[in-house]
């Protein structure tokens, strides 16, 4: 059998520059990467994920010197970039003519991110161009946080998977729209709305929704098991008892430390499916800091439409 998982950055960059697609590590989740300017390669990413082609992709770049080639950054965007990049942070800004329609789904804006993961940075430096990278899972399913997860989900459909260990954050980047003078968070992540508001000294809204960022529909990040959300440990115990009495296999999901919760979230959802349980009772973290992103992902994992 061919070796799909590698640690050889130069090899993976050659695969990408030759029009291949690769699973790549970032600090948030693993991405399915392709050369942003290669239409056939980007179309293969959509096809392998099973994702509609009008759902726009994030362009990943090595260094901020390059960013003006791809996007138009106003004062707020530049200031946020200085404060939070590289890191788990994506800026949505007007695009330049360089950015192709096949990346943005025809939209006039482009999402740009500078990962802080060392292996991702080495790869981006080596390829010397922008890489699109949606999460490396099948459309609507649980995101991958290890190279093995990518192999389980996409297997022989990817050309190569670059192994950079387990992702140190575990949930996708914060997406912030900086178009005109308003600043809006479209997807919560490790960089929080309050950090952004404090940095800019501005009110910042959290406005997620399908129309703003296609692909943010309710059901997403979903395991096969049904996810039941509870707010207290007592409620969790009651739910588990009721479900077990009815003859269902149930597992509970909770980590008292929110960072550990984020790191282990997707792996725990995947493990529940490997065990074949019918229900996951998830005790929600407090709605502050990283807890907001975890609640967002869990509510989508629990949605059935
Ligand atoms: O942490 C992350 O951001 C990961 C890693 C691999 O970098 N990537 C990721 O990509 O989560 P993806 O494709 O699964 O999610 C990107 C989201 C999509 O839901 C899409 O709606 C939004 O970004 N997006 C990208 N470009 C956009 C645009 N021009 N306008 C509105 N939304 C956009
Ligand atoms: Mg995704």
Image (cartoon, helix red, strand yellow):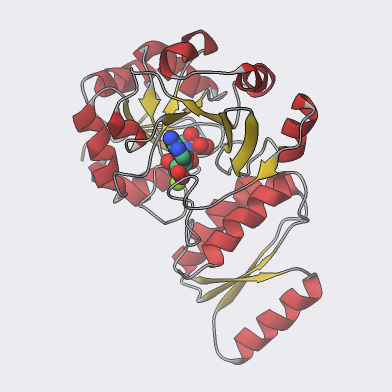
Q: Is residue 64 left or right of residue 104?
A: right
Give the percent coordinates (x, y) of residue 227: 56, 70
Q: Is residue 212 left or right of residue 83?
A: left
Residue farthest to the front, as pictured: 180
- 73 vs 135: above or below: above
Residue 159 seen anywhere in this rendered image of the structure: no
Residue farthest to the top, as pictured: 65
- 253 vs 244: above or below: above
Q: Quadrant of residue 184?
A: top right
Q: Residue at x 69, y 20 (%)?
A: 83
- 264 vs 272: above or below: above
Residue farthest to the bottom, as pictured: 246
Count of all numbered marks drawn on residues in the image = 0
Give the percent coordinates (x, y) of residue 209: 53, 52
- 88 vs 142: above or below: above
Quarter of the image that includes the C terminus = bottom left
Give the percent coordinates (x, y) of residue 122: 46, 16
Q: Is residue 45 left or right of residue 276?
A: left
Q: Residue at x 59, y 21 (%)?
A: 86
Q: Residue at x 42, y 23 (%)?
A: 95
Residue 241 seen anywhere in this rendered image of the structure: yes
Give the percent coordinates (x, y) of residue 34: 31, 29
Task: Please state which of residues 27 and 9 is positioned toward the viewer in this rendering.
Answer: 27
Quarter of the image that includes the N terminus = top left
């Amino acid at each position: 059998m061919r070796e799909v998982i590698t640690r050889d950055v130069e090899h993976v960059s050659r695969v990408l520059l030759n029009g291949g697609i690769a699973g790549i590590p970032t600090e948030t989740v693993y991405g399915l990467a392709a050369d942003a300017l290669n239409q056939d390669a980007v179309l293969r990413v959509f096809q392998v994920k099973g994702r509609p082609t009008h759902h726009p992709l994030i362009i990943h770049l090595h260094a901020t010197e390059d960013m003006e080639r791809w996007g138009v950054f106003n004062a707020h965007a530049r200031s946020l970039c200085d404060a939070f990049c590289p890191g788990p942070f994506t800026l949505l800004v007007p695009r330049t003519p360089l950015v192709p329609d096949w990346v943005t789904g025809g939209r006039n804006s482009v999402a740009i991110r500078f990962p802080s993961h060392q292996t991702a940075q080495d790869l981006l430096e080596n390829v010397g161009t922008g890489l699109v990278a949606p999460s490396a899972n099948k459309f609507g399913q649980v995101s991958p946080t290890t190279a093995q997860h990518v192999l389980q989900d996409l297997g022989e459909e990817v050309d190569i998977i670059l192994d950079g260990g387990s992702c140190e954050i575990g949930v996708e980047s914060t997406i912030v729209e900086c178009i005109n003078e308003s600043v809006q968070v479209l997807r919560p992540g490790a960089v929080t709305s309050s950090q952004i508001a404090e940095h800019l000294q501005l009110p910042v809204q959290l406005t997620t929704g399908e129309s703003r960022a296609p692909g943010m529909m309710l059901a997403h990040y979903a395991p096969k098991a049904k996810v039941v959300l509870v707010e207290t440990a007592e409620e969790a115990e009651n739910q588990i008892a009721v479900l077990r009495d009815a003859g269902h296999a149930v597992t509970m999901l909770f980590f008292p430390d929110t960072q550990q919760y984020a790191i282990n979230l997707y792996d725990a959802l995947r493990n529940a499916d490997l065990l074949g349980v019918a229900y996951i009772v998830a005790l929600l973290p407090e709605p502050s800091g990283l807890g907001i992103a975890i609640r967002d992902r869990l509510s989508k994992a629990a949605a059935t439409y």
